[in-house]
Image: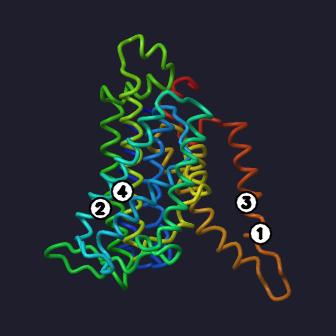
Amino acid sequence: MSPRTRQLSTWGFFLILAILPILPFMPPKLGGEIKTILVFCILALGLNVVVGYTGLLQLGIAAFFGIGAYITGILTVDQFPFRWSFWTAMVAATLGAGIAGVLLATPTLRLRGDYLAIVTLGFGEVVKFAIKNLENITNGSKALNPIPDPSIAGLDIDWTNSYRGYYYLALFVLAAVVLLLRNLEDSRLGRAWMAIREDELAATCMGINAARVKLSAFALGAALAGLAGSLYAVSLDQTGGPDSYTFNRSIQVLCFLIIGGMGSIEGAIVGTLVLLGYDNLLTPLLDGWIQKPGRSFKFSDVKLIVFGLALILMMRFRPEGIFPARRAAGKAA
C-alpha cells in the first residue's frame, strides 16, 4: 500500500467514525465503547513514538497515562481549590506528563534494551503505589470525582445522558494527534528518531545528537499519554483509581503495537481497535450467545488463551504487524 493510499484510507476511516454516532441504529453502549477505544488509540500512538519510531523499549506508559488523569482530577474537582476548566487542565496534564517523561529519560539515556525497560517498569510501579498511598492528594483507591464536564461556548452538549459529546471530543483529539505525527514522520526529527532505531552508532557518526533525540521521543510519548489520561478521566467522570494504571495496562498497549505494526500510525490505531474490540465488544457478545440455562462455560474464561494463540501466530507469520511501518513494508515488498 502506497503512502498516499494509506493516508486516504486513514482519513476515510475517520470519516466513517464521524458518521457512526448520527446513524439511527447505532446503540449507545457500542458508541460508548468506541469512545473509550479512541482514547486508547491516542495512548498507543504515544507509545509508538518511543517504541515504534525510536526503538526504545518503554514498559511504563501507563504511569504517564495515570499522571495525566490525576493532574486533570486535582485541577478540576471541588475537593481542591484550583477548580480549573477542563481545557486548561488538559493542557496542564499534557505538559505535566511530558515533563515527567523528561525527568525519567534524562538520567537513563545511556541505558539500552532490557535495562531501560526495567527502569521504566520500575517507574510505573512507583507511580502506581504513589497514587495508592498519597490519599490526601489522590483519594487512594477511591479515585478523584466528580470531574466536571467540559464547557464549549455556544454549544449545548448533553455530556451526561449521551456518549456523543465525549465521542467527538476523543475523535477530534485523535485526528489532531494523527496529523501531528504524520507531519513529524517526514520531518528532520522524525527521520532522526528512525535513524536511532535502526543504528544508534551510525546515526551518531552522521551528526545526530542521540541523547537529545531520545529525550524528545520520551517527552512527546509521555505528553500524548498524559493527554489520553486527561480524556480518559473526564469521560469516566473520575480518575479511575490506581488499578487503571498498572503494568498490565502498559503491556496491553504494547500488544496493540505488536498486533497493529510497530512504527505505523495505522498499525497503532488498528491494533487498538482489534484488541479492545475483541476484549470489550466481541467477548461479551460471545458470552451472551454461548450462555444458556444449564451451561456454566463462558468465552471470557478462555479469552486470554485465544489472545495468546493469536499473538503467537502473528509473531510467527507476520511479525511486522497488520499495518507495518513504511520501511518494513518496503522490505517485505
- Quarter of image, res 25: bottom left
Q: Name the residue rendered at 51%, 25% in the picture.
A: 330
According to the image, what is the colour scheme of the structure?
A: rainbow
Of circles 1 and 4, which is in front? 4
Q: Name the residue rendered at 57%, 48% in the picture.
A: 122
Mark positioned earlier in the residue sequence (4 or 3): 4
Q: Which three-letter amino acid code belongs to the residue tagged 3?
A: Leu
In this rendering, would 109 be left or right of 88? Answer: right
Q: Name the residue rendered at 52%, 49% in the picture.
A: 123
User: Which residue is nearer to you in this view: 300 or 21?
Assistant: 300
C-beta proximity under 8 Å, tags 2 and 4: yes
Q: Which three-letter amino acid code belongs to the residue tagged 4?
A: Leu
Residue designated by label 2 = 90
Q: Name the residue rendered at 81%, 89% in the picture.
A: 293
Cα separation, mark 4 vs mark 3, equals: 29 Å
Residue designated by label 4 = 227
Mark positioned earlier in the residue sequence (1 or 4): 4
Q: What is the x, y in percent for residue 125?
A: 57, 54
Q: Name the mark on residue 304.
A: 3
Helix, strand, or loop for circle 2?
helix
Q: What is the x, y in percent for residue 249?
A: 57, 57
C-beta proximity under 8 Å, tags 1 and 2: no
